[in-house]
């Protein structure tokens, strides 16, 4: 999984570095639209398929067949919308091809994900991770080859090549699954059992579509709004800043995914090891947040000179939001472990509506900073709703006063350093000191060690 994340990071670095600003904006807008295509085709079914495969109540081949059947209507509707768009608005031929290739790749990826869910459900995590990494490496290799051979390829050429990668990965996943005896077993099912399976899939769609839809709106509707209300160049600046924010979140999310089974076993009272691990994740997010906010734009300038000039403040503010978003992710992991899905859905729904309202008002007036304000509104709203759940007695362990103080001190300190326009040689050590002092607030163990150190020092002086 780490290899997949590294490959995706290199892929986006190549996109942001090799393509002109207008092409980066067009690519980002198209990918934002494809996120909604993926939502429409998958309908939230995939998150629950792992559980159904793990329970082994139905032959896996039939589950895949029924999941595919359930998705036929959304695929047909996507095709109808595409046809009406292509025939009614008469866009450029290159754009039509790019959209067609991108949508086909997204549909194939959804199908591949069904086989990946089966692999995870039957505890073949290594194979599922290898499949994921193969896709990421394939996309990186194709992009690198196109850039090396043709300089800057057209969007149609790029998405055509990416579609080829998705075809290869889908065919490989399908062939591997069909080569396994436990997948090929096609035990006869009565019509009643078939109806029961279809009802299970419909329940999965009902339970997960809302969460998947809200997540897609949170992460990609702001891209669409920036593209429509501003320009593709503005979207390129915002997408670059937002992508770094998402990369940090995905890296920290890997750690939270690893600890989730332990949290589920320990219930309402996380053990010392789990609690310590979660605090380490919060400390790591603070380090990423402080570093990205204080020196992120300078690092980008070293990579791409002034290509993304105008997006520096957006990058600083979004990176500063990483620590808040990680705070919410820690709360999310604990709520999932304690069956707090209702709190998650309610908090996510209200926060998404608030973010949408802020985006609609702020983007036309503030430009991409309006979208950044919307993202900040989202993470703060979710955090406040989790805090309100604490006040109601639905305790979320580790989201206590020390954690809030840790984040507030860090954010206030970084804003002060940025606002004072301190030189880089002062900003870096000041940021390290700021993070260390904030960490002392969060970590009781660190405070005890510091207290012991000072007691020893006083003893030596005496």
Image (cartoon, rainbow, N blue to C red):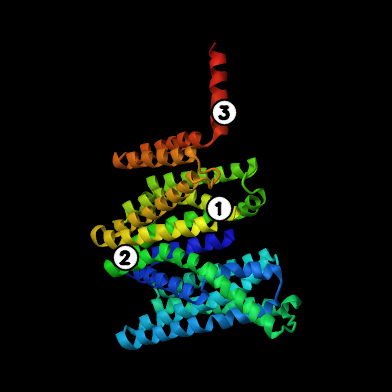
Image mark for residue 448: 3
Q: Residue furthest left?
A: 365
Q: Which quadrant of the figure has residue 369?
A: bottom left
Image quadrant occupied by the C terminus:
top right
Distance between the alpha carbons at the discs numbered 2 and 3: 48 Å
Quick one: SS at disc 2? helix
Q: Are marks 1 and 3 in contact (CB under 8 Å)?
A: no
* Above or below, 90 relative to 395: below
Q: Which residue is labeled 1 in the image? A: 335
Residue 130, image x, y percentages = 63, 67
Front one among 211 and 238: 211
Left or right relative to 144: residue 371: left
Residue under the image location 40 percent in, 83 percent down: 81
Residue under the image location 48 percent in, 67 percent down: 210
Q: Which residue is labeled 2 in the image? A: 226
Sequence order check, earlier mark of 2 and 3: 2
Q: Which quadrant of the figure has residue 308?
A: bottom left
Quick one: SS at disc 3? helix
Left or right relative to 444: residue 237: left
């Amino acid at each position: 999984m780490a290899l997949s994340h590294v490959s995706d990071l290199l892929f986006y670095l190549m996109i942001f570095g090799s393509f002109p600003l207008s092409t980066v904006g067009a690519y980002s807008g198209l990918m934002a639209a494809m996120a909604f295509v993926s939502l429409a085709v998958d309908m939230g079914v995939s998150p629950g398929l792992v559980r159904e495969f793990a329970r082994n109540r139905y032959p896996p081949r039939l589950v895949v067949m029924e999941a595919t059947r359930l998705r036929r209507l959304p695929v047909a509707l996507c095709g109808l919308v595409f046809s009406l768009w292509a025939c009614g608005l008469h866009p450029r031929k290159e754009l039509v091809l790019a959209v067609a290739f991108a949508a086909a790749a997204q549909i194939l990826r959804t199908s591949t994900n069904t086989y990946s869910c089966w692999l995870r459900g039957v505890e073949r995590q290594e194979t599922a991770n290898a499949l994921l990494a193969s896709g990421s490496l394939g996309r990186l290799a194709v992009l690198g080859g196109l850039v090396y051979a043709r300089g800057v390829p057209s969007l149609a050429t790029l998405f055509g090549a990416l579609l080829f990668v998705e075809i290869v990965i889908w065919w490989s996943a399908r062939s591997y699954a069909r080569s396994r005896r436990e997948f090929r077993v096609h035990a006869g099912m009565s019509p009643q059992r078939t109806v029961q399976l279809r009802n299970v899939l419909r329940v999965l769609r009902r339970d997960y579509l809302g969460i998947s839809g809200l997540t897609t709106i949170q992460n990609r509707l702001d891209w669409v709004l920036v593209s429509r209300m501003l320009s593709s160049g503005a979207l390129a600046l915002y997408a670059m800043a937002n992508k770094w924010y998402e990369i940090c979140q995905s890296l920290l999310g890997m750690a939270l995914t690893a600890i989730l089974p332990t949290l589920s076993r320990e219930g309402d009272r996380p053990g010392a090891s789990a609690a310590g691990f979660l605090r380490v994740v919060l400390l790591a997010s603070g380090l990423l947040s402080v570093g990205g906010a204080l020196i992120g734009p300078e690092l980008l300038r070293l990579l791409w000179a002034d290509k993304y000039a105008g997006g520096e403040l957006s990058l600083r503010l979004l990176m500063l939001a990483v620590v808040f978003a990680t705070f919410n992710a820690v709360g999310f992991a604990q709520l999932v472990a304690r069956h707090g899905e209702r709190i998650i859905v309610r908090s996510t729904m209200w926060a998404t509506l608030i973010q949408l309202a802020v985006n609609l008002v702020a983007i036309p007036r503030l430009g991409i900073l309006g979208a950044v304000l919307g993202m900040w509104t989202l993470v703060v709203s979710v955090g406040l709703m989790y805090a309100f759940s604490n006040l109601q007695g639905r305790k979320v362990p580790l989201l206590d006063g020390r954690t809030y103080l840790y984040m507030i001190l860090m954010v206030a300190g970084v804003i002060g350093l940025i606002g004072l326009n301190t030189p880089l040689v002062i900003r870096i050590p000041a940021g390290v000191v700021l993070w260390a002092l904030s960490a002392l607030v969060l970590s009781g163990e660190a405070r005890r060690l510091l207290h012991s150190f000072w007691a020893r020092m006083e003893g030596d002086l005496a």
